[in-house]
Image: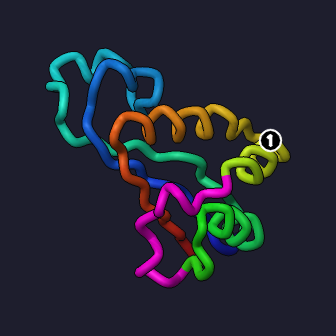
Amino acid sequence: MGMQAEIIAVGPFSKKIKNCLDYRSELYENTNDGSIITVRLFGMIGSNTSREFASLLGITNPWDFNQHKINIESINFVELEKFVYQFEIDYGDDLQKLLVLKDNGFEFHFRPQG
């Protein structure tokens, strides 16, 4: 199976991000605005796919942990959009979530597995 990769988004909860959350909306009913939450994005499978995904995020070596905090300015959004729409799995929703979370104060961390 090789490497897998995902993004872990970390940032403040607000009702503006309700369509980006990992769990059912009722589970967040008692969550205060500003509470720090996490959201998992993408979930790429396969070494080549994961490496290409990493490169689009500005990461030159997926196993260099110094690069795992993603610099949002380093993301190639034009190529990332082309990349995510080439799969049977619909990653387009995750791309939209990434954009919404970016605009709402989240930071992003690359997480390889395998």
Q: Quadrant of residue 27?
A: top left
Which colour style is shown? rainbow
Report helix, strand or loop for mark 1.
Answer: loop
Apparent side of residue 103 relative to residue 44 in the rendered image (left or right): left
Horizontal and vertical percent for residue 92?
69, 35
Left or right: where 87 falls relative to 54: right
Location of residue 111 in the rendering, given as x and y in whole percent from the top left corner = 48, 65
Horizontal and vertical percent position of residue 53: 68, 62
The image shows residue 99, relative to residue 8, as above or below, that is above
The magenta stretch spans which residues? 63-76
| Image point (71%, 72%), residue name | 47
Crowd around label 1: few <14 · some 14–19 · many ≥20 (10 Å):
few
Figure check: 70 above or below 96: below
| Farthest residue, direction front | 73
> Magenta includes 71?
yes
Which quarter of the rendering shows the N terminus?
A: bottom right
Residue plotted at (60% across, 57% down): 75
The residue positioned 26% from the left and 23% from the top of the image is 28
Horizontally, residue 85 falls left or right of residue 94, namely: right
Residue type at tag 1? Tyr
Q: Quadrant of residue 76?
A: bottom right
Which residue lies at the image location 74% right of the left edge and 48% below the top edge? 78
- Which percent across, then down, holds residue 108? 42, 55
Which of these two is toward me, 52 or 99?
A: 99
Label count reads: 1
Q: Residue under label 1, please give it.
A: 85
- Whether the magenta-drawn stretch holds residue 81 is answered as no
Query: On the rendered image, what quadrant is the C terminus found in?
Result: bottom right
Q: Is residue 44 above or below residue 14?
A: below
